[in-house]
Image: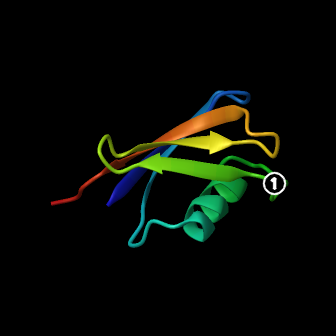
């Protein structure tokens, strides 16, 4: 699957191919590609829309991601 990420504060967007969708995988991509040193990041995800939000430690939306099935 392909995950498209966007971080609002730094205006950075990228896509990554991943094999498993979980918080640890998302965290690694946000930290490395998004250049975020903090581990105080959370995620929410809606399976119906295949989109999610990247949240700060105080639950503010700091970005978004979407999942695209790869055929």
Please report the residue visible at 62 percent of the width from the left and 43 percent of the height from the top: 54
Q: Considering only vertical position in the picture, is 55 above or below 19? A: above
> Is residue 25 among the parts visible in the rendering?
yes
Query: What SS does tag 1 mark?
Result: loop
- Residue 18's spot in the image, x, y percent? 42, 66
67 vs 19: above or below: above
Residue, x 34% and y 51% (percent of image)? 47
- Name the residue nearer the viewer: 2 or 54: 54
Q: Quadrant of residue 29?
A: bottom right
**Residue 49 image point, x, y percent:** 32, 40
Image quarter hosting the C terminus: bottom left
Query: Is 57 placed left or right of 4 in the picture?
Result: right
Check the picture and name the quadrant holding the N terminus: bottom left
Residue 6 visible, this angle = no
Of residues 65 and 14, the one drawn nearer to the viewer in this rendering: 65
Q: Residue furthest left?
A: 71
- Give the image location of residue 65, x and y in percent: 48, 43
Give the residue displayed 57% in from the left and 60% down from the top.
26
- Is 1 positioned to the left or the right of 44 in the image? left
Report the front residue among 54 and 32: 54
Identify the image quadrant of residue 70. bottom left
> x, y (%) of residue 33?
64, 52
Residue at the disc numbered 1: 40
């Amino acid at each position: 699957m392909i995950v498209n990420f966007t971080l609002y504060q730094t205006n950075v967007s990228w896509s990554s191919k991943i094999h498993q969708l979980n918080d640890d995988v998302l965290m690694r991509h946000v930290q490395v590609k998004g250049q975020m040193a903090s581990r105080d990041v959370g995620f929410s995800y809606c399976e119906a829309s295949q989109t999610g939000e990247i949240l700060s430690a105080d639950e503010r939306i700091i970005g978004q991601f979407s999942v695209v099935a790869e055929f």
